[in-house]
Image: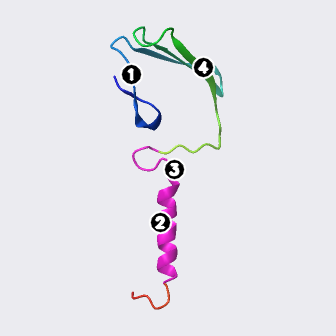
Amino acid sequence: MTIVGPGGKPVPTSERLRIVERLTRVAADTIDYEVVVEDPAMLTAPWKAAFPLELDPGYRFFEYACHEDNSAVRNFIETSRYERSHPKRGAAR
């Protein structure tokens, strides 16, 4: 398995790599996330991270395939519309 690290460089792993993720609902608006990474050939001890995921009613989620709240696309469209409605003087149409 190849894991991509900082700068797009691969992180070394072995065939013994094991990643376990746990999601536990602890309240109506909170899920505890926990991940444990084990790779006895590469790590001296298992590595663990945990943090709460809390509901944010204002958060907007978009399908990755078509949008992912990509502001660059929106900015491109808005700029294009502005340029079409405000042509430069002397520019051919």
Question: Does residue 25 appear to the left or right of 14 in the view shown?
Answer: right
User: Is residue 85 one of those drawn in magenta?
Assistant: yes
Question: Does residue 25 appear to the left or right of 10 in the view shown?
Answer: right
Answer yes or no: do the residues labelled 2 and 1 have beta carbons within 8 Å?
no
**Distance from Cα at disc 3 to Cα at disc 1:** 32 Å
User: Which structural element holds mark 2?
Assistant: helix
Answer yes or no: do the residues labelled 4 and 3 have beta carbons within 8 Å?
no
Residue under label 2 = 77
Residue under label 4 = 50
Task: Look at the image and give the residue range highlighted in magenta.
Answer: 63-87
Answer yes or no: do the residues labelled 2 and 4 have beta carbons within 8 Å?
no
Disc 1 marks a residue whose amino acid type is Pro
Between 6 and 75, the residue placed more toward the observer is 6
**Distance from Cα at disc 2 to Cα at disc 1:** 41 Å
Kindly report which numbered mark, 2 or 1, lies closer to the viewer in this rendering. Answer: 1
Q: Give me the residue at 39% from left, 45% from top.
A: 65
User: Which structural element holds mark 1?
Assistant: loop
Against 87, residue 79 (above or below) is above
**Distance from Cα at disc 4 to Cα at disc 1:** 23 Å
